[in-house]
Image (cartoon, rainbow, N blue to C red):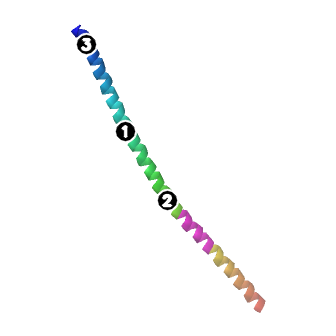
Amino acid sequence: MCWLIWQVAMILKNVNDTMSEAREKMAKIEEAITAIRGKFEKATVGLSFLGDGIRKLVEYVIEKKIEKKSKKIADADEL
């Protein structure tokens, strides 16, 4: 009878140890996913700023080209 109780206790201990390990691994996975998500969000914000800067630069270049062409046309009309 004592042997049976001891066997059941050992089985329960092994189950408890396994569950503890599973909880620890799940916590590490959750932590890694959270870290990746944070890095992705930071990268997205950085790329957004970069995209806005490039867009403004392209708009500026186009505006300058239009001004230059307008000036050439105006100069040609004066001659």
Give the residue type at disc 2.
Val
The residue wearing badge 3 is 5
In this rendering, would 46 be left or right of 26?
right
Within 10 Å of the Cα at label 3, are there few (<14), some (14-19), or many (20+) other Cα atoms? few
Q: Which residue is mark 2?
A: 45
Please report whichever mark, 2 or 3, sits nearer to the chain's N-terminal start.
3
User: Mark 1 belongs to which amino acid?
Assistant: Ala
Q: Magenta part of the protein: which range?
A: 50-60
* Secondary structure category for the residue under label 2: helix
The front one of 10 and 69 is 10
User: Which mark is in front, 2 or 3?
Assistant: 3
Q: Earlier in the sequence, mark 3 or mark 1?
A: 3
Frontmost residue, 68 versus 13: 13
Residue type (three-letter) at the residue carrying disc 3: Ile
Residue placed at 37% from the left, 39% from the top? 27
Cα separation, mark 3 vs mark 1, equals: 33 Å
Residue 1 horizontal/vertical position (percent): 23, 7
Relative to 74, is 42 on the left or the right?
Answer: left
Which quadrant is the C terminus positioned in?
A: bottom right
Label 2 and label 3: CA atoms lie apart by 60 Å
Give the residue drawn at x 67%, y 81%.
68
Q: Is residue 41 above or below residue 13?
A: below
Q: Quick check: 18 above or below 70?
A: above
Q: Which residue in the protein does label 1 denote?
A: 27
Asked if residue 33 is positioned above or below residue 74 in the image, the reply reads above
Q: Which of the two discs, 2 and 1, sits closer to the camera?
A: 1
> Residue 26 at x, y = what percent?
38, 36
Image quarter of residue 77: bottom right
| Of the pair 57 and 26, the residue shown nearer to us | 26
